[in-house]
Image (spheres, rainbow, N blue to C red):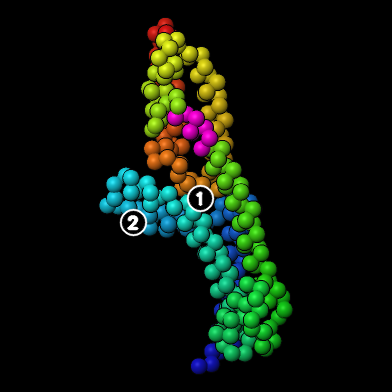
Amino acid sequence: MVVPVAVRSLAAVAGGALVITAWANVIGTLVVPRRGSWLTRWTDRIVNRAFIVAVSRANYQRRDRVRVAQGVTILIVQLVAWLGSSFIGFTLLLWPFVTGGITQAFTVAGGSMTSVGFSDPTGTVPPAIVFAAAASGLVIIAPQIAYLPALDAAYNRRETEVVLLNARAGEPSWGPELLARTHLVLGSGVSTFDTLSGLYAQWERWAVDAADTHTAYLPLVRFRSSQPLTSWVTALLAVLDSAALLLACPRGRRR
């Protein structure tokens, strides 16, 4: 079946728009993270819904074991979506120019994007499209390689303070437990409430850093702590609860 030139031309326009959209999402997510990306948000929603369905009938221990992989799954699906969108886009872009139909355009796009070049373009294919397809793999994968260390560094900063809090607030962290252990100093009978000001200042900076990194790197929200009863959300809530209780308690009764 011979597809009319007009139809192939419209498909090429759609393919170009798809390529531009994929590149814009890559730049918006990895290079200018404050801008955000609709593709990243939709990826997060789809993967999160899939994990909710997968663990809907499981107990907490099984849910925690399964959800450990959620953050990594989002990164993989996100990368596949970017590469797949670019691949389909370049296939449609090449379709009007190759001889052999959509199958040949599919082969040429795959060979160009992977830089394998196992199929030479036949027809009047503009070199710019082939070069752009070859560069698109680098445009997508290279920033992703640089993105992972930044993600890992933000995760380590977050979890270091959370793990340190376990010694003072228990596991899972609890506001009253934090106040009780600070007051008793693990059985010494000497109150050390004066050390809480330093703890709150430290967690104030932690909260600012977490807000910035978790807004910039959306998949970081889905990365769970290394221990099943430890959570950065619970830890922050425990610190806030302890501060609220401390402010509500008359100063004379803190000793």
- On the image, the x and y values in percent for residue 199 come to 52, 23
- On the image, the x and y values in percent for residue 224 come to 45, 44
Q: CA distance from mark 1 to mark 2?
A: 19 Å
Callout 1 amino acid = Pro
| Main secondary structure found in the magenta portion | helix
Q: What residue is disc 1 on?
A: 219
Against 121, residue 36 (above or below) is above
Q: Residue at x 44, y 32 (%)?
A: 235
Against 112, residue 180 (above or below) is above
* Residue 22 shown left or right of residue 167 in the figure: right
Considering only order in the chain, which callout, 2 or 1, is on the residue closer to the N terminus?
2
Indicate the quadrant containing the C terminus: top left, top right, bottom left or bottom right: top left
Is residue 97 visible to the viewer in this orientation of the structure? no
Q: Residue at x 52, y 56 (%)?
A: 75
Q: Secondary structure at mark 2?
A: helix
Does 164 lie within the magenta span?
yes
Against 228, residue 7 (above or below) is below
Callout 2 amino acid = Ala
Q: What residue is disc 2 on?
A: 54
Quadrant assignment, res 99: bottom right
> Could you say which is closer to the camera, residue 176 or residue 45?
176
Please identify the residue farthest to the right as the structure is shown. Answer: 127
Quadrant assignment, res 185: top left
Stretch in magenta? 159-166
Q: Residue at x 35, y 53 (%)?
A: 52
Q: Are marks 1 and 2 in contact (CB under 8 Å)?
A: no
Against 92, residue 181 (above or below) is above
> Could you say which is closer to the camera, residue 42 or residue 59?
59
- On the image, the x and y values in percent for residue 13 come to 60, 76
Please identify the residue farthest to the top as the structure is shown. Answer: 252
> Could you say which is closer to the camera, residue 173 or residue 17?
173
Does 13 lie within the magenta span?
no
